[in-house]
């Protein structure tokens, strides 16, 4: 069985927790002594008070928005998706950006993001003179949807 190893860095930190048996992600909780306000249009780093070990270099942890605060309040990870590499042992921090016109206050122990573990491919890198041909070619940025 794959394990997510979690080290509490502060006594008031909460362990990541899945809301239901079918939840893909683990809720991450704000490890705060007092409420933290994210002003409208600004970003703040939110500590979780934990460090993690995903147990294998074949996995990485990804930090996604929680739909509740993202949809209802416009608050989501500043970098869209955060990446916690398999060899990272520092505190898991969540950079949250307030996209709304209203300040948003995060309370201690509030669920601020979700952590999803996924396999990662780490292929070798080889420089080549040419790439294989495809029907798409070099098109991108909407090129397959044009008439």
Image: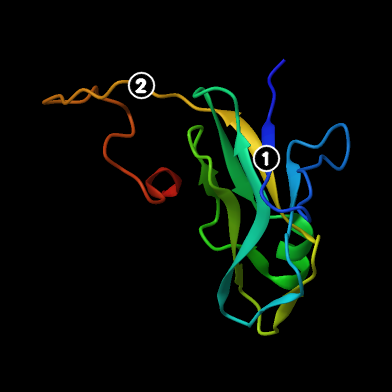
Label 1 residue SS: strand
123 horizontally vs 100: left or right? left
Q: Is residue 97 above or below residue 8?
A: below
Residue name at image x 73 percent, y 66 percent: 32
Looking at this view, is 50 or 137 the one in front? 50
- Closer to the eye: label 1 or 2: 1
The image quarter in which residue 20 lies: top right
Q: Which residue is mark 1?
A: 7
Within-10-Å neighbours for mark 2: few <14, some 14–19, many 20+: few
Q: Number of labelled discs?
A: 2
Q: Residue furthest left?
A: 129
Residue name at image x 59 percent, y 24 percent: 55
Looking at this view, is 115 or 4 the one in front? 4
Q: Which residue is mark 2?
A: 123
Looking at this view, is 41 or 3 the one in front? 3
* The N terminus, quarter of image: top right
Residue name at image x 77 percent, y 74 percent: 34
Give how far apart the Cα atoms at labels 1 and 2 are: 30 Å
Q: Percent from the top left, x then y, of residue 92?
A: 60, 50
Within-10-Å neighbours for mark 1: few <14, some 14–19, many 20+: some
């Amino acid at each position: 069985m794959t394990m997510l190893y979690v080290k509490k860095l502060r006594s008031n930190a909460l362990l990541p927790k899945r809301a239901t048996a079918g939840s893909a992600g683990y809720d991450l909780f704000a490890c705060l002594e007092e409420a933290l306000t994210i002003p409208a249009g600004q970003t703040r780093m939110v500590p979780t008070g934990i460090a993690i070990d995903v147990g294998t270099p074949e996995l990485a942890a990804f930090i996604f928005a929680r739909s509740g605060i993202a949809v209802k309040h416009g608050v989501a990870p500043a970098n869209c998706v955060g990446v916690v590499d398999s060899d990272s042992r520092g505190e898991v921090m969540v950079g949250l950006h307030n996209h709304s016109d209203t300040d948003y206050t995060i309370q201690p122990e509030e669920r601020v993001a979700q952590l999803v573990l996924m396999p990662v491919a780490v292929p070798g890198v080889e420089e080549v003179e040419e790439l294989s041909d495809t029907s798409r070619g070099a098109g991108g940025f909407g090129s397959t949807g044009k008439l």
